[in-house]
């Protein structure tokens, strides 16, 4: 693949200076939006992003072997043009990197998607949103393109909000989404998180199964997160919708990914509306880190590996003004970067902000910066190989 140079604006010159770690800014290649990033064990940066009309556009993939200084030429992920969606901000592509660097991508299908899922009996049968699929693709064996998309929804319907994907070096791939099923309660109370599993690098998937046996409901137009650690522990983060107004963040944990999840409420929020929020899980030295939104503020916490134990939620400094879509990264020195969007309203342009923290990840503020942000978009963050961070926006 040909490499394309991108401009980097370094805000601090040292990766471990008194002012805080280096934070470099990269634009999304080709003027795209909604960047999602993953760094594999060989420090290759994998990036997907969206381009096109918000209701029916395309997903593209690039990679970098030099911390984002150059990227490969973009490759379209979705085999059918226009079958991806950006509107709503949380329904776009998610990626994970598995065995031998194979990339796995999931996204909510648009109304133009030829593949369809089961119909929702609560909606009109001719509604173009009825039967929207959850689409999945992976890089082909040669690594120079993506296989034809597949729909993973076989027994669930009413897809909304954002899905998630996790993979490991043993060929396991997990895809999660929230939806309804036959016989469930109507509305958000009947929604739950579902997991489809693969043990052959995504060549085949099991029929989706419910992740959690408690009736928490699921916030319809919110995203979720999955994380698979090297020990095979599978974690999930999602927002509930108990009794309409209890839209709390729940953390789920499974010992092996194929066993039932245990769960706990991580953060409470009482609001009688869907906040259209997203969340993230990333690895850390002692387990993983989680980030999410509550009451127009973003929070993060450390999760102990192999458990549901967590630190107290922490927040960045300053006044919360519609802070949304947090992303978090941890560099080789144990420094933490928290990135979030500040968006005034639906489909409006906003700003991207971030704050860095000292090596304990929770205590010492190192600075806040802001840059402009396109409508329907958010930032992405990853650690540089020699310390410090890159923000993609």
Image (cartoon, rainbow, N blue to C red):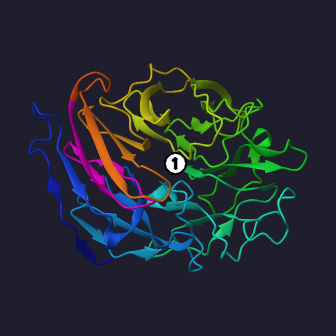
Work out which residue is located at the far front of the displayed protein and give it. Answer: 344
- Give the percent coordinates (x, y) of residue 350: 36, 53
- Percent position of residue 301, x then y: 43, 27
Residue 393 seen from this side: no
What residue is drawn where x is 56% and y is 23%? 308
Nearer to me, 277 or 140: 277
The image quarter in which residue 12 lies: top left
**78 sits to left or right of 342:** right
* Residue in front for this viewpoint, 310 or 34: 34
Q: Is residue 379 magenta?
A: yes
Residue 219: in magenta span: no
Which quadrant holds residue 270?
top right
User: Taking 373 as reference, is 145 left or right?
Assistant: right
The residue positioned farthest toward the right in the image shown: 183
Give the residue number, with chain letter if any, for mark 1: 168
Residue 246 visible here: yes
Q: Quadrant of the C terminus?
A: bottom left
Q: In the figure, residue 69 lies in which quadrant? A: bottom left
Q: Secondary structure at mark 1?
A: loop
x%, y% of residue 353?
30, 44
Give percent across and percent down for residue 203. Answer: 64, 64
Circle 1 Cα neighbour tier, 10 Å, few/some/many (<14 / 14–19 / ≥20)? many
Residue plotted at (10% across, 34% down) = 17
In the image shown, does 42 or 287 lie closer to the viewer? 287
Tally of marks: 1
Rendered view: 294 above or below 71 = above
Q: Quadrant of the N terminus?
A: bottom left
Q: In the rendered structure, which segment of residues is drawn in magenta?
A: 366-393
Q: Is residue 351 above or below residue 71?
A: above
């Amino acid at each position: 693949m040909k490499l394309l140079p991108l401009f980097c604006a370094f805000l601090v010159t040292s990766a471990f200076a008194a002012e805080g770690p280096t934070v470099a800014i990269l634009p999304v290649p080709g003027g795209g939006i909604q960047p999602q990033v993953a760094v594999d064990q060989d420090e290759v940066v994998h990036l997907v992003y969206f381009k096109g009309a918000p209701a029916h556009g395309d997903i593209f993939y690039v990679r970098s072997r030099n911390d984002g200084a150059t990227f490969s030429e973009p490759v379209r992920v979705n085999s059918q043009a226009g079958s991806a969606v950006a509107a709503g901000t949380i329904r776009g592509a998610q990626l994970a990197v598995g065995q031998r660097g194979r990339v796995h991508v999931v996204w909510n299908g648009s109304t133009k998607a030829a593949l369809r899922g089961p119909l929702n009996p609560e909606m009109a049968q001719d509604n173009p949103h009825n039967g929207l699929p959850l689409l999945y693709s992976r890089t082909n064996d040669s690594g120079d393109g993506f296989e034809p998309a597949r729909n993973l929804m076989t027994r669930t319907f009413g897809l909304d909000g954002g899905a998630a994907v996790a993979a490991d070096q043993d060929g396991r791939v997990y895809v999660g989404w929230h939806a309804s099923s036959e016989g469930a309660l109507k509305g958000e109370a009947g929604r739950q998180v579902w997991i489809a599993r693969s043990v052959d690098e995504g060549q085949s998937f099991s029929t989706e199964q419910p992740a959690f046996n408690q009736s928490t409901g699921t916030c319809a137009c919110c995203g979720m997160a999955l994380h698979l650690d090297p020990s095979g522990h599978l974690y999930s983060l999602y927002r509930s919708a108990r009794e309409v107004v209890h839209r709390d963040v729940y953390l789920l944990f499974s010992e092996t990914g194929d066993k039932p999840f245990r769960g706990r409420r991580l953060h409470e929020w009482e609001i009688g509306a869907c906040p259209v929020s997203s969340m993230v899980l990333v690895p850390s030295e002692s387990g993983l880190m989680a980030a999410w939104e509550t009451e127009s503020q973003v929070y993060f916490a450390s999760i102990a590996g192999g458990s549901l134990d967590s630190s107290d939620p922490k927040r960045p400094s300053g006044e919360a003004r519609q802070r949304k879509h947090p992303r978090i990264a941890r560099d080789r020195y144990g420094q933490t970067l928290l990135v979030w969007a500040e968006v005034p309203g639906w489909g409006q342009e906003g700003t991207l902000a971030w704050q860095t923290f000292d090596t304990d990840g929770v205590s010492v503020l190192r600075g806040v910066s802001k840059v402009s942000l396109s409508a329907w978009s958010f930032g992405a963050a990853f650690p540089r190989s020699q310390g410090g961070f890159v923000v993609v926006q």
